[in-house]
Image: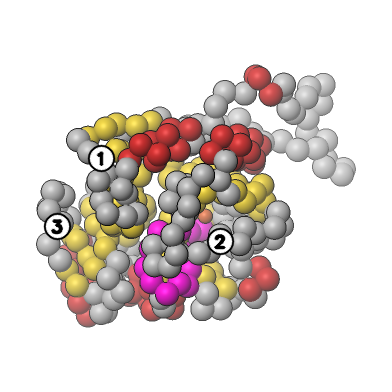
Amino acid sequence: MPVTGLLSVTLEVPDVEPGIGFYTDAGLLCDRVGPDAQLRCAGQDRPSIVLLGGRPRKRLHHVALRAADLPQIAERVPANGGKLVAAPEGFAEDGLWVEDPHGGLFHLVDCAADAELPQGPEFRINAPGRIVRTRRSAILPRAAYPPARPLRMGHALLFTPDVPESVRFLSEALGMGLADHAQDVIAFCCARTNSDHHVLAFAKSPGIGFHHASFQVADPDEAGRAGRALADRSRRGDWGFGRHTIGSNFFHYIQDPWGSWFEYYADMDFIDDYDLWSPTNYDMADSLASWGPKVPDDFVHNYEVAGAFEPA
Ligand SMILES: [Fe+2]
């Protein structure tokens, strides 16, 4: 079971400052390294988002994945239409650097799993015939809540010109599994053991690119509260609060300074053993959400290949 999780997303950007403002408003911590910025969750000592500053335009540089059995991956990559390539200048040579059939770059690193997150308070709701919370309010006054605290980056969604081909490469070369998909337009892939419903996902586009990275928060209330606060502060597009059909997670998306998205999520489906999971092909009506506000017009627009995003 080669790929076991997502480590980081690295983006080239002209100017790191708007990105630092956005991601720290979202609750990440920033470490500056020369012209670049590394953004991490408060409880982690490694970055989730890396911004490479001073580049001509925003574009996805690479995605880093945690993986085991790298020699097996090294054999399977060329046999499945990919290439093993040298580390880009200035990047670590450890692990494997892999180019997929569409030119997307992945860095596979064999490193220890993250520590389990500490157990949070139970999210209890009163329901018909099932009263589980009495003599107290579920919701505190607004001022009682601290700023959002993303716990970890759970998944990223990338653009690809050929969704089934990207899924095939992830499955055959990198040892992941197709969790679910909606036609040939969007697909969600998991690790084969003890995985969130999706770790990497793909949406159809004329070219490759970065759509969003998603950060887990404690519960649905924090996803909604944090999403509203970040949307009000950033004053760009947002989509949420809502709940996905595929993966079942509650979500709130906020547009980043380059037209791609940041997601807060809570309560995602979990696949403990991929051999016991059956992927579903959903209708397009279920491709984005079970319920939620109207989807922004440019929610699935790849600004890395078409059009210029005008930041607020
Ligand atoms: Fe997501």
Left or right of 279, for residue 137: right
Q: Badge 3 is on which residue? A: 87
Query: Which color scheme does this rendered protein use?
Result: secondary structure
Look at the image and tell me in which quarter the N terminus lies: bottom left
- Which mark, by number, is residue 36? 1
- Residues at marks 3 and 2, CA–CA distance in whole angstroms: 33 Å
Residue type, mark 1 in image:
Asp
Left or right of 135, for residue 160: left
Identity of the residue drawn at 50% across and 64% down: 301
The reply to whether the C-beta atoms of the residues labelled 3 and 2 are less than 8 Å apart is no
Q: Earlier in the sequence, mark 1 or mark 2?
A: 1
Across and down, in percent, residue 46 comes to 30, 38
**Is residue 102 shown to the viewer in this render?**
yes
Across and down, in percent, residue 91 comes to 16, 50
- Asked if residue 225 lies in the magenta stretch, the reply is no
Q: Which residues are magenta?
A: 197-213
Across and down, in percent, residue 244 comes to 63, 57
- Quarter occupied by residue 221: top right
Label 3 Cα neighbours within 10 Å, binned few <14 / some 14-19 / many ≥20:
some
Identity of the residue drawn at 74% across and 28% down: 138
Establish if 301 lies above or below 134.
below
- Residues at marks 1 and 2, CA–CA distance in whole angstroms: 28 Å
- Which mark, by number, is residue 115? none
Q: Secondary structure at mark 1?
A: strand
Q: Secondary structure at mark 2?
A: loop
Q: Badge 2 is on which residue? A: 298
Q: Secondary structure at mark 3?
A: loop
Left or right of 258, for residue 229: right
Residue type, mark 3 in image:
Ala
Establish if 243 lies above or below 74.
above
